[in-house]
Every structure is written in C-alpha cells, then in structure tokens.
Image (spheres, rainbow, N blue to C red):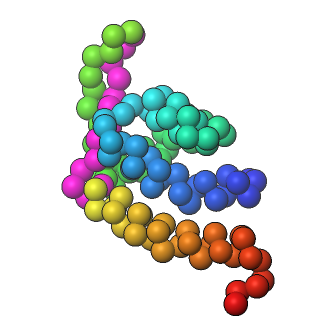
Amino acid sequence: MTLRSQLLKGILEGCILAIIDQQPTYGYELSVKLQGFGLTDVSEGSIYPILLRLQKEDLIQGTLQKSEAGPKRKYYHLTSEGKKALQEFKLHWNSIKPPVDKIMEKGGKYL
C-alpha cells in the first residue's frame, strides 16, 4: 500500500460523508465527484466497502430509486448519526490540518 493510499484511507470516509451531506448520491457518482476534486486514484472498488461500513454503523442509509438509464440506483443519504459523525470529522480535521500545514512549510523550524 502506498503512502498516498494510506493517507486517503484515513480521510476518505469523511470526504464521502461530506459529499453525501450535500445531496443524496450513488456509488459511481461518488467516485466521479471524488475524482473531480482531484482524488483520481479512488476507485469504485474502494468506495463500496466504505459505503457498506457506513451503513452498518447507521451513518448513512440507502434507498433504491429509478434511473433514467438502466437499472435502479442506490442513493445514499446521511442519518442524524451520520451528520454528527461528519461534524466530528470536520472538528478533528480542522484541528489537525493547520499544524500539519505548518510542519510541511517550515520543516523543523517551529519558532
């Protein structure tokens, strides 16, 4: 596993929750949106296990809806627990990001 994929594994769940929070989304659409944001190495194969886990944890729910092209699609939306989890992720991310950015910019010079 590459360093990039290890880093992504830790934050992908929060990114998926944030996208679903904006509007109900289906699996392939999530993949396209993540790639559109620049996460080009995130495949559908890595998204579906996360969606299953999020469902088991009752953070998202899926409902089958008609598709204009082809079979029905499972659209996911956040539950109230999912909204709480997203807020918690944002809180942790916002507390970690600034110090990491500083370290990346300044290296060992912390003063």
In the rendered view, would you say 53 is above or below 91?
Answer: above
In the rendered view, would you say 18 is above or below 70?
Answer: below
Residue 8: image location, x then y, percent: 61, 54
Q: Over which residues does the magenta segment extend?
A: 70-82
Q: Quadrant of residue 39?
A: top right
- Farthest top residue? 69
98 vs 20, nearest the viewer: 98
- 30 displayed left or right of 45: left
- 89 displayed left or right of 36: left
Name the image quarter holding the C terminus: bottom right
- Farthest left residue? 80
Query: Which residue is at 48% across, 74% downward?
Result: 95
83 within the magenta span: no
18 vs 75, nearest the viewer: 18
Query: Which residue is at 48% across, 66% downward?
Result: 93
**Number of residue marks:** 0
Query: Which residue is at 74% across, 58% downward?
Result: 3
- Farthest front residue? 111
Residue 72: image location, x then y, percent: 33, 18
- 39 displayed left or right of 69: right
Q: Quadrant of residue 38?
A: top right
7 vs 94, nearest the viewer: 94
Q: Does residue 111 appear in the picture of this structure?
A: yes
Residue 10: image location, x then y, percent: 56, 60
Query: Which residue is at 45% across, 55% downward?
Result: 14
